[in-house]
């Protein structure tokens, strides 16, 4: 009898440092965080059985993964799952965690990039895949454009590669705010415009690259949370401006904009929207400061009648945890 468990972590997508330049589209910036998580387990069984105790609807993803493994006879339990369509990269973590667990129980290696290719992950961003592999703060290579269109990855090399990865200090905290009753764009909706990017003004691209190279990356090696925060705020504003024609403004919705502005007003060094939202986040140094910022944000959003889930999290500087037991 074999038992395999896999736990992987949500990620914040902090924006792009490139939109379209020299035949390369996008180029993502992101960070793995220690909560929320996806946790699955698989054990040998006489027939296939799925038990979902996470409280999150995952049937569509799980059925696709199981079908690719020929509905192998196992008991698959979803203990925890990252909330869906809120900008935390839930689908990638669910696919990779489940695929890895099934691979292990079948005696084959868990190769995150092979799984990503099979299950069509990494079409635009490679942050979730890299978060599963090693965690930390990540910058990826973006995608090559062919005839103005981003195509489905046909090989592992087509998936965005990690060009910079660094752990973040344990003292840095992210305040995560997820407005309730709001959902970001799903993958089908985003593909309508992400697959055929239009070239932005050169000044916008120049400022994105300058902010990344001259300010954001040095702030990590210098352990300067304030410059880090200011840099991600600026990148978020520039990227939000580019995508405003698709999401109706710099942010996906009024609730997220209110959360971002409240985070900054209450002392976050920087703030933004993760992916298509509605998740907002702010960064500070120190847990006590994070608590103080969170109290102010809760007060502000309550006055506006906005309900939300709140977390104080840190960067997850390691990849997914895989445990294998035999009896």
Image: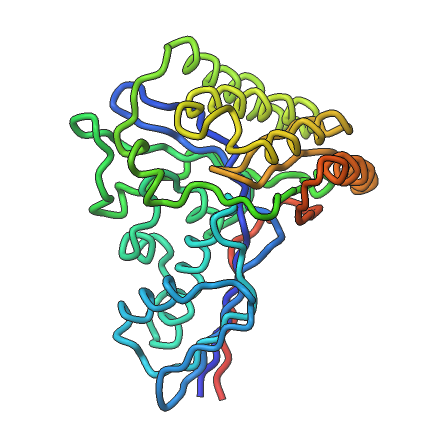
**Percent x, y of residue 65:** 33, 66
- On screen, residue 22 above or below 247: above
Within the image, what quadrant is residue 172 found in? top right
Left or right position of 271 against 277: right
Task: Report the residue that reaches farthest toward the top.
Answer: 203
Q: Which residue is rendered at x = 51% and y = 33% of the image?
A: 252
Q: Which residue is rendered at x = 52% and y = 63% of the image?
A: 56
The quadrant of the image that shows the N terminus is bottom left
Task: Depth check: give the residue in front, 72 or 53.
Answer: 53
Q: Which residue is rendered at x = 36% and y = 39% of the image?
A: 161
**Percent x, y of residue 170:** 70, 43
Task: Depth check: give the residue in front, 297 or 28.
Answer: 297
**Percent x, y of residue 157:** 27, 43
- On screen, residue 56 above or below 218: below
**Percent x, y of residue 38:** 53, 61
Q: Which residue is rendered at x = 79% and y = 42% of the image?
A: 287
Left or right position of 42 against 146: right
Left or right position of 84 against 196: right
Task: Depth check: give the residue in front, 32 or 75.
Answer: 75
């Amino acid at each position: 009898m074999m038992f395999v468990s896999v736990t992987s972590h949500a990620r914040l997508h902090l924006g792009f440092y490139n939109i379209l330049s020299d035949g390369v589209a996008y180029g993502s910036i992101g960070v793995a965080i220690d909560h929320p998580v996806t946790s699955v387990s698989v054990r040998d069984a006489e027939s296939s059985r799925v038990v979902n105790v996470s409280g999150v609807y995952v049937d569509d993803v799980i059925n696709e993964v199981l079908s690719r493994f020929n509905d192998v006879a196992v008991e698959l339990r979803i203990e925890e799952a990252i909330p869906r369509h809120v900008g935390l990269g839930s689908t990638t973590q669910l696919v990779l965690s489940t695929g890895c667990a099934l691979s292990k129980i079948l005696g084959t290696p868990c190769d995150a990039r092979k799984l990503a290719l099979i299950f069509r992950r990494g079409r635009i961003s490679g942050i979730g895949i890299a978060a599963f592999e090693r965690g930390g703060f990540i910058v990826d290579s973006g995608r090559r454009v062919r005839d103005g269109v981003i195509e489905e990855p046909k090989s592992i090399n087509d998936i965005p590669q990690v060009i910079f990865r660094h752990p973040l200090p344990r003292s840095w905290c992210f305040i995560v705010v997820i407005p309730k009753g709001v959902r970001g764009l799903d993958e089908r909706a985003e593909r309508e415009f992400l697959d055929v990017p239009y070239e932005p003004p050169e000044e916008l691209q120049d400022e994105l690259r300058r902010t990344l190279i001259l300010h954001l990356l040095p702030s990590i090696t210098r352990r300067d949370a304030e410059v880090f925060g200011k840099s991600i705020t600026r990148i978020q504003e520039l990227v939000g401006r580019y995508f405003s024609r698709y999401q109706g403004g710099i942010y996906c919705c009024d609730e997220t904009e209110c959360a971002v502005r409240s985070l900054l007003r209450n002392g976050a060094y920087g703030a933004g929207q993760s992916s298509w939202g509605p998740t907002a986040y702010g960064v500070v140094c120190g847990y006590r400061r994070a608590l103080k910022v969170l109290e102010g944000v809760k007060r502000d959003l309550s006055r506006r009648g906005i309900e939300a889930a709140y977390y104080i999290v840190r960067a997850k500087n390691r990849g997914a945890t895989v445990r294998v037991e035999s009896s």
